[in-house]
Amino acid sequence: MHTLTNKRMKFGAVALLAAMLVAASSYAQKVSADLSQEVTAVGEAVQLNISVTGATGARVPGQLKVDGLQIDFAGRSEQINIINFQKTVSAVYTYLIVPLKTGDFTIPPIDVLINGQKYKTAPLTLRVGTSSGGFAGGQGQPGRARSPQSQMQAQMQALMQFMNQGVQPPQPQQIQPGQQSQSRQSSAGDDAEPAYGDLIIPKTSAYVGEVIPVEIRFYFNANYPTQLRDHPTFGGDGFTVMDFSKPTQREQEINGVPYNVVIFQTAITAVKSGPLEIPPAKIEGRIQVPARGSSQDDFFNGFFGGQGFGMTARDMTVSTKPSKIDIKPLPKDGRPDDFSGAIGQFSLDAKATPKKVDAGEPITLSVKVAGRGNFGAITAPTLLDAENWRSYPPNEKFTPSASDPIGYNGEKVFEYTIVARNDATLTPTPEFSFFDPAVEKYVTLKAAPIAVVARGSSTATQTTTVQAASSSPTPQAATPAPATPAPAEKVVDLVTSFRRGAFLPTLTDPTFLTVNGVVALALLALLALGILRAVASSDASQRAARLREVRRTLHAAEDPSKSAEEFFALAADFVHGRLSIAGGQGSTRDMLESSKVSEETRTAIYALLNQADEARYAATHGTSLDREARHTYIQQLKKFDAQV
């Protein structure tokens, strides 16, 4: 029975071995490079692997030169896979990186020569800080990142050794519930500790308000199945903590012991100067450890990650060690007036759309601040040379870099709405100031103004006036009255002159003509008067109708259900319409300036129009307008209506 069981176990192991070989081949790539870890500390080694798949005899550099890093070639390994009678050859060229100082380092593309053809790897970034005292990459023996292939190979070698040689596997170390792992074990096997934490901070000093990236690593012995309950707890007095990034996981071999490494990234910001004590970060979970008196078959429990085969669950809390940073205050000398607290390295750029507008039409001025630093403290840049423009509070949007999980790198865009007061050919000049901790100085950036063609309100008014004047009819010269013909010589009617009581026709009777002429003139006068009255009545009617329509707009603005944006839009329409009825021409502000209202009323209406523009163009939509303020505005509008 025991023999049959062993045969079944060996058969299952061989089947698993074949499945692993098939899975391992799926990771093949042409040429690639990766680091065993992207964050480390000074003096703590990191492994750089160049993987070449599908070719043999590749040539790589013997040494890589990066200032601040010592990079030496460590060796080469080769693997041959045969799947479906097809052979795949892959080789891994390994370099050992030892950081010599802190900072962010870029490893440039590496040239790989394969059969006379040159390939380049992608650049890699390594962040080097100061360790909290814990292990980060290896002590004594360099840490090695376990690729899926190397992990499977290690498991298969252990399995074949157990099957063919009968070697008893080492028993994992037992831990007590709630045990915290702070020290580092240098031996492998049952002496390796089950879990520990490490806190990586890339700086030993910083400034108040500066964002400091932090990486928290928790190492879990791969021989013990572990389940984490939640994110780490991390925080303390004197600094704020950003939200944790989504955790990443990798496998790493340390002193011959496989570890699962869970990495959380965040950032801290100091709020006061002086020594800053950073407490340990902690995480809680449950770990599966061998039960007391378990049989040697527990090897398979560790191999398959199983539960219930001689394993028991224990609660566990894993902690990092504390750390300390020296926090310096920002210098007072040279601080710009527009400095708002931005700290980091940034660039400034601007663009405008559209670049040609008529009077009263807005232009969107987009100002982009890009770089790395405390984007939360960046406020809207100042607009200089803006005398010919009206600007409104901008809309802002932050977009983090795709490679940055904590929002330390990215860009922030401010979109201003600007409207020309007068004719303008250049937009305002954006200005932004920040403190650069790398050079320990304040920096002020200015984006070049953008060429535009924008007509101002005053120009539109002048144009309208000129057009109106040119369209009015030119008075014609008075047509001279026809000359009165000289009276004809009196012709003597010789026939009638000899008769007494001669007959005169009625139509030629002077009296008749005089009376009828007077009557005709009276009728013509009455007709003209009627026409004038009709015309006057029509103009008054139209004006009255327009006035009623405009006042309905004011009445609609009194509705308390109208939002602030709707109220100000209706109020602006009322002011413009009322001034137009009074004979004004041009923009609302130009008509208001030339109107006969009192100075007090004019000032109040100017303020209302500014509020209306801000509600229309600015990013602060949704602002509330209380009942008292609405009532005050309505009373001002009614007073304005009475004075126009």
Image: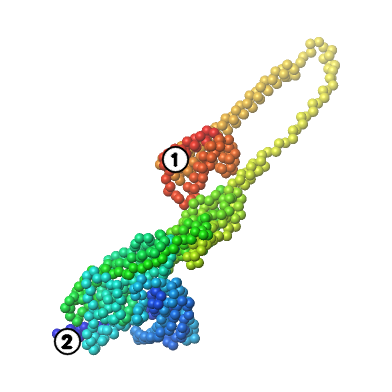
- Residue type indicated by callout 1: Ala
Q: Which residue is mark 1?
A: 629
| Residue 383, quarter of picture | bottom right
Q: Position of residue 430 (x, y in %)?
A: 54, 57
Decide: few, some or many residues near mark 1? Use Cα within 10 Å; few <14, some 14-19, many ≥20.
few
**606 shown above or below 35:** above
Relative horizontal placement of residue 622, taking residue 231 as reference (left or right): right
Q: Is residue 326 visible?
A: yes
Judged from the image, the secondary structure of the residue bearing numbered disc 1 is: helix
What number is the disc on residue 3?
2
What number is the disc on residue 113?
none
In the rendered structure, are the residues bearing label 1 and label 2 in contact, judged by CB atoms less than 8 Å apart?
A: no
In the orientation shown, which residue stands out farthest toward the bottom? 165
Decide: few, some or many residues near mark 2? Use Cα within 10 Å; few <14, some 14-19, many ≥20.
few
Relative horizontal placement of residue 466, taking residue 11 as reference (left or right): right
1 vs 2, front mark? 1
At x 26% / y 84%, what residue is drawn? 159
Q: Is residue 304 visible?
A: no
- Residue type indicated by callout 2: Thr
| Residue 261, quarter of picture | bottom left
